[in-house]
Image (cartoon, rainbow, N blue to C red):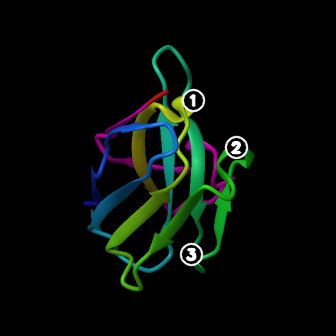
Amino acid sequence: QVQLVESGGGSVQSGGSLRLSCAASGFRDSRYYMGWFRQAPGKKRLGVAAIDCGGRPSYIDSVKGRFTISQDNAKNTLTMQMNNLKPEDTAMYYCAAGRSGGLLLRSYAYGYWGQGTQVTVSS
């Protein structure tokens, strides 16, 4: 059974940095892709960054140049380095994994989710 556990959230001031990690287990082969999503209070859960089976990253426009998604070779750990954080980045951040295909920045493509880690950026 796939399990995802996030860590690394916290509170920072605008312009600060955080590094999120997701420990993954239970993958049965190498065809899983993974992503980070975020959900602010009262808003939908949205994709932020994803990495496909071949290690290619994708990002939403608002985080390009600020966030970097990466994964270790064994696909045991997914990380996202977040720099130059802004108050609008404040949200609960979720790690996700999927295998069925689809647009990797859309939640429907993912069947496995972590519990989330809170990121709060103050101005």
- Compared to residue 15, the image places residue 23 above or below, namely below
| Chain part drawn in magenta | 98-121
Q: Residue at x 31, y 45 (%)?
A: 9
- Compared to residue 88, the image places residue 49 above or below, namely below
Which numbered disc, 2 or 3, marks the residue closer to the eye? 2
Point out which mark residue 62 bears.
2
Q: Of callouts 2 and 3, which one flags the residue occurring earlier in the amino acid sequence?
A: 3
Q: Residue at x 38, y 57 (%)?
A: 19
Q: Which residue is mark 1?
A: 88
Q: Of callouts 3 and 1, which one flags the residue occurring earlier in the amino acid sequence?
A: 3
Is 95 colored magenta in this rendering?
A: no
Rendering coords of residue 22 (x, y %):
32, 59
Q: Residue at x 58, y 77 (%)?
A: 55
Q: Which residue is mark 3?
A: 53
- What's the residue type where badge 1 is placed? Glu
Residue that protrudes farthest toward the top in the picture: 42
Q: Secondary structure at mark 1?
A: helix
Q: Are marks 1 and 2 in contact (CB under 8 Å)?
A: yes
Rendering coords of residue 99 (x, y %):
51, 63
- What's the residue type where badge 2 is placed? Ser
**Disc 1 crowd, CA 10 A, few/some/many (<14, 14-19, 20+):** few
